[in-house]
Image (spheres, grey):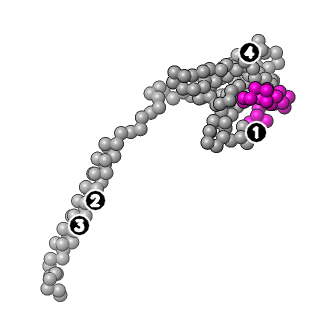
Amino acid sequence: MNRKFPAHRRPGRRAAFAAGLVLAVGLGVSTQVSAQASVPAPARASTAAPQPVSGTFGQAVTRVADFYGAYVDAKGDYTDPDVTLATALRKHYLTPDFAERLAAWENKNGADGVLRAQNVPARWTVTDNGTVGNGHEVIVTLTFGSGETTQKTRLFVLVERYDHIVDIGTTSAR
């Protein structure tokens, strides 16, 4: 047996050590909880209730909303726009004839024909405008900018009976 540490003192030291460890862990946790409690929660972007988005298969408004939502997302990443996706979306949603006419419009005007602009909108809305001939007209309102400096562009998108976009213009076909 060691004279400096008699056997009868070890349990006391172990108990003191264990108590100190529990206290240290307890303080660490309570300090952590206090620190977490003092950090403010991230603010919500809006206090309004979330807006639902819904659609119906085969409905012209839903189809145009799907197209514009995906197209704006593909074009909207300024650091890495997805040109391949934007091209594939145009091929899928536009008739070949309209795609050719749109390319000619873009070459003449130096802007994206789907958006009728050189940049990407901050917001967009899609509204039904009713039947036109054998097709359906949908109004797409694009909002560019933010705050007090916004500009809105209203586009009239004509969808044929087979759910392909056959025209995008700034005036109604009605």
Circle count: 4
Dot 4: element: loop
Quick one: label 1, few (<14), some, or many (20+) residues within 10 Å? Answer: few
Image position, residue 116 (x, y; %) = 71, 25
Kind of residue at disc 2: Val
Q: Earlier in the sequence, mark 3 or mark 1?
A: 3
Q: Choose top left, top right, bottom left or bottom right for residue 128.
A: top right
Quick one: label 4, few (<14), some, or many (20+) residues within 10 Å? Answer: few
Kind of residue at disc 3: Ala
Kind of residue at disc 1: Ala
Q: Nearer the viewer, residue 91 or 106?
A: 106
Q: CA distance from mark 4 to mark 2?
A: 70 Å
> Which residue in the protein does label 3 denote?
18
**Residue beneath the point at 65% across and 20% down:** 153
Residue 166 is at least partly visible in this image: yes
**Residue beneath the point at 47% across and 26% down:** 48
Q: CA distance from mark 4 to mark 1?
A: 26 Å
Dot 2: element: helix
Residue 58 is at least partly visible in this image: no
> Which residue in the protein does label 2 denote?
25
Quick one: label 2, few (<14), some, or many (20+) residues within 10 Å? Answer: few
Q: Earlier in the sequence, mark 4 or mark 2?
A: 2
> Which residue in the protein does label 4 denote?
171
Q: Earlier in the sequence, mark 2 or mark 3?
A: 3
What is the span of residues highlighted in magenta in the rendered image?
A: 87-112
**Residue beneath the point at 76% across and 39% down:** 88
